[in-house]
Amino acid sequence: ADEAVLDPWGSSTVADYRKLFEQFGIERFDDVLPEVPNPHYLMRRGVIFGHRDYGPVAEAMRNGDPFAALSGFMPTGDPHIGHKMVFDEIIWHQERGADAYALIADLEAHAARELSWSEIDEHARSYILSLLALGFDPEAGELYRQSDNRELQDLAFELGAETNFSELQAIYDFDGETDVSHMQSVVTQMADILYPQLDEPKPTVIPVGPDQDPHIRLARDLAARMRYFGVREAFASFEADAVERTLLRQAYDAREDYADEPELPRCVEAADYLREREPAPADARESVVEKLDNAGKEPIRPRTRIFDRNATEEAFEALIEAVSGEKRVYDEHVDAFDLDHAEADELAREVELDTGGYGFLPPSSIYHRFMTGLTGGKMSSSIPASHISLLDDPAEGYDKVKSATTGGRATAEEQREKGGKADECPVYELYAYLLSGDDDEFAEEVYEECVGGERLCGGCKEQAAELMEAFLEDHQEKRAEWEEKLDELDIDFDS
Ligand code: SF4
């Protein structure tokens, strides 16, 4: 099919990454790369190829400001070398000062994949061990299981109040057969994504595969939507200050309507609301009404008044002035008519924070390429020969690499003449994604020798297989060390 389909629970690969830029608005990572201090090798080599809004994360990193990184793992099988990329991405951000979170998406595994709790417990343990063995610092970061985290579930409940079925239907293709727990696992995941900002809003990056992008889009949307939530709460309590700020919020909302229409319906509505509501803070109410009346030349008739453009502009300014008290918030932000998106967003967040809301920043994301399976095609947990599990016996890992498909030519002679096709070779991917580590020169050397015909597949695979064996040995030793210390961490693996 022509359309790129992104299904977080499906088995689709994303064959053409260009479509992600065109159809879904994912931005090219190359564009933000110069802003990243000492970028990770996966970034340098284009394995991390896309992002949404990574700029604020890079900026926080450069300035030593607070930021966070979070990723969730669905414990549906053994962790494999594809997961290692995500572990590494979280750890790398943690080393650069991020508040790092890794969570076990056990509710999702149970609801969307129908795994039993005992399977989930076993896999959850294994994911955590690999994450720790690769360098995650559990003292500085936070590890949790969705099912154990009460705060998370409270947030999920509130997010659920802002999400409806038609929306999930449109985003995830849910239908009448979709069970309620699956839907609940979606709002839980939304809560995961926003969880690092519960105490304090901060840039947060979620490293994912591109198939997870629907979650990111929904979470970004909800982050903005929750702004209204806080404001509504304040409105309900009807304290003078909160009302003033709510009106400011509504005036802010109206600015886009104002661009095309010579009226400000929501401002008028806000004023009406204020007039009708009892008990009301008389001063604020009277002053808004009076100023609107004066500026509008004629007295306001609720909901029917259409100002001429100039009068509306004056009325709008009068309203802003009236509702923002000493104009503190307003004055910090240029003229409301000229707010660009970022400024307007900042204003809305301030209003929200002032009125007891969350003030979430829209979460950022980075996207990595999927690894090709060792047997060609997709790397899949259900095809053992296609991937290397982090739990594979090192000798077995060695054998799998030796048996892998390559981008080599039919004969050694042809290979010397034309060079190998490193770009289509799963073994080269192993070098680039994992075996070369931070050593760009080594990765480049393998590439150049391959495409230049100096490298033949037999020797190349032998070298890769040995490196893989050594990696697995080392990794499993570290897992064993953590196994002994795992009980000290506050994670419950018996559900
Ligand atoms: Fe792949 Fe190595 Fe053969 Fe090149 S030489 S095609 S990188 S196995």
Image: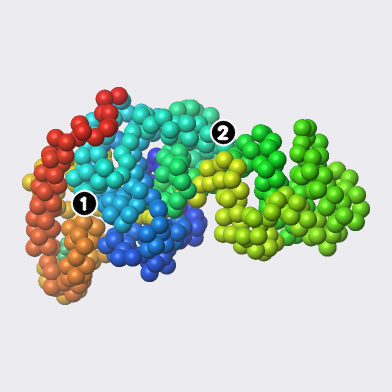
Residue at 59% in and 45% down: 354
Residue 74: image location, x then y, percent: 33, 38
What number is the disc on residue 395?
none
Badge 2 or badge 1: first in the primary sequence: 2
**Count of numbered badges drawn on the protein:** 2
Residues at circles 2 and 1 in contact by the CB criterion of under 8 Å: no
Front-lying residue, 430 or 418: 430
Quadrant housing the C terminus: top left
Task: Please identify the quarter of the rendering in which residue 34 is found.
Answer: bottom left
Position of residue 431 relative to residue 450, above or below, is above
Q: Position of residue 192 (x, y in %)?
A: 42, 40
Residue 132 falls left or right of residue 143: left
Q: Which mark is residue 161?
A: 2
Inter-mark Cα distance, 2 to 1: 44 Å
| Residue displayed at 37% across by 63% down | 62
**Residue drawn 7% across the image and 46% down it:** 395
Which residue corresponds to the image point at 68% horizontal and 63% vertical from the top-left?
335
Q: Is residue 35 above or below residue 161?
A: below
Please say if 220 is above or below 436. Answer: above
